[in-house]
């Protein structure tokens, strides 16, 4: 396929909390395919502001390479980008678009399950605190998170797979109580700064996306093109997880399966017969992707690597 180069880029942004399982690997493959099939660069950002398991990032990169995926430029760690995150938070604060929130995790959980208001939305408990009330809470020593003072309650995005999607925008957290930038802020700032105008990721993140797109517009950043791809499920219909058995490349290798065989399995789950990325790229057509989740049974597909 001859694809005209595109100035933007796509990316895969794993959290280094453990080995990638087949669901993560399939999402990475799709992100690579979407980027390459549209002439875009493809980058990897390790989202290490939270849940880091030592050595996991290195193993994740090794597994992506073993599948035959390549990427452009250096792998970026999100933790190295916090000055940009804080600068964006400061711009929002200067524009009057933030406020301190002293709610505990428990209080927020209780509030978001309250019968009024949209599901999962922060009801704005701390939004209208007076200066005196804020001072009182600070004096109690509670660390404050910083929330967006949203001017909307909903925002619409366009998704390659889901079409137009309208979802809740609440006063979500921009900076956690421990001072660390929150995911929804960091992802928006980083994608824009790194020139990633295409976001391909699991559709479990679709509900957060209107928040992120709205935040991009507040910061004057281009809203990326989104494709939220179906997750891989286990045989009970739940999202695939490590406890489901042989689900990582390492687990599959222990059963005698090569990375190429795992690649073919993933290609098959997308409706293609291909043994490597370049072959798959020639066949790939985003419009033909299965829109339903793929169910994986770890014991179903053990393929012998040798003849007996
Ligand atoms: N780091 C997130 C995850 O592993 C993905 C974020 C994204 O792709 O925007 O679930």
Image (tube, rainbow, N blue to C red):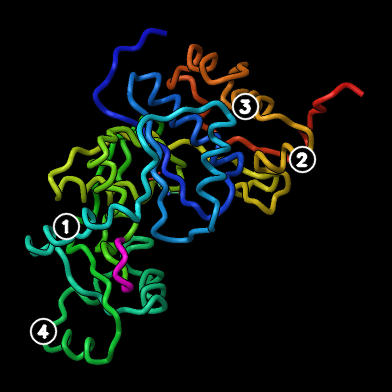
Label 3 within 8 A of ligand 1 by Cβ: no
Residue located 42% across and 8% down the image: 1
Earlier in the chain: of badge 4 and badge 2, it is 4
Earlier in the chain: of badge 4 and badge 1, it is 1
Figure check: 13 above or below 139: above
Q: Which residues are magenta?
A: 177-181
Residue occupied by mark 2: 254
Mark 1: few/some/many CA within 10 Å (<14, 14-19, 20+): few
Mark 4: few/some/many CA within 10 Å (<14, 14-19, 20+): few
240 left or right of 69 in image: right
Q: What is the spatial separation of the Cα atoms under label 2 and label 3, in whole angstroms?
A: 16 Å
Q: What is the spatial separation of the Cα atoms under label 2 and label 1, in whole angstroms?
A: 46 Å
Q: Secondary structure at mark 4?
A: helix
Mark 3: few/some/many CA within 10 Å (<14, 14-19, 20+): many
Residue occupied by mark 4: 131
The residue nearer to you, when weighing 83 against 248, is: 83
Q: What is the spatial separation of the Cα atoms under label 3 and label 1, in whole angstroms?
A: 41 Å
Mark 2: few/some/many CA within 10 Å (<14, 14-19, 20+): few
Earlier in the chain: of badge 3 and badge 1, it is 1
Residue occupied by mark 3: 263
Q: Quadrant of residue 62?
A: top right
Earlier in the chain: of badge 4 and badge 3, it is 4
Q: Secondary structure at mark 1?
A: helix
- x%, y% of residue 237? 64, 46
């Amino acid at each position: 396929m001859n694809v005209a180069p595109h100035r933007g880029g796509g990316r895969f942004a794993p959290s280094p909390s453990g080995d990638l399982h087949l669901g993560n690997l399939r999402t990475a493959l799709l992100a690579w395919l979407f980027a390459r099939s549209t002439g875009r660069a493809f980058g990897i950002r390790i989202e290490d502001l939270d849940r880091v398991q030592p050595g996991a990032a290195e193993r994740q990169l090794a597994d992506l390479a073993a599948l035959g995926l390549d990427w452009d430029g250096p792998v970026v760690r999100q933790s190295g980008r916090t000055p940009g995150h804080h600068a964006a938070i400061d711009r929002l604060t200067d524009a009057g678009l933030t406020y301190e929130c002293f709610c505990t995790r428990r209080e927020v959980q209780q509030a978001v399950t309250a019968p009024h208001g949209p599901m999962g939305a922060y009801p704005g408990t701390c939004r209208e605190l007076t200066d005196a009330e804020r001072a009182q809470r600070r004096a109690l020593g509670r660390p404050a998170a910083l929330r967006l003072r949203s001017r909307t309650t909903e925002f619409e995005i366009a998704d390659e797979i889901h079409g137009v999607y309208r979802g809740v925008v609440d006063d979500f957290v921009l900076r956690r109580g421990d001072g660390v930038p929150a995911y929804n802020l960091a992802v928006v700032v980083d994608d824009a700064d790194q020139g990633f105008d295409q976001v391909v990721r699991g559709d479990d993140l679709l509900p957060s996306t209107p928040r992120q797109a709205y935040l991009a517009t507040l910061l004057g950043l281009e809203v990326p093109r989104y494709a939220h791809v179906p997750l891989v499920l286990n045989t009970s219909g739940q999202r695939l997880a490590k406890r489901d058995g042989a689900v990582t490349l390492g687990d599959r290798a222990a059963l005698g399966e090569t990375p190429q065989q795992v690649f073919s399995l993933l290609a098959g789950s997308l409706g293609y017969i291909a043994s490597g990325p370049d072959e798959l790229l020639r066949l790939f057509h985003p419009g033909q992707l299965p829109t339903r989740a793929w169910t994986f049974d770890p014991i179903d597909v053990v393929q012998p690597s040798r003849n007996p």
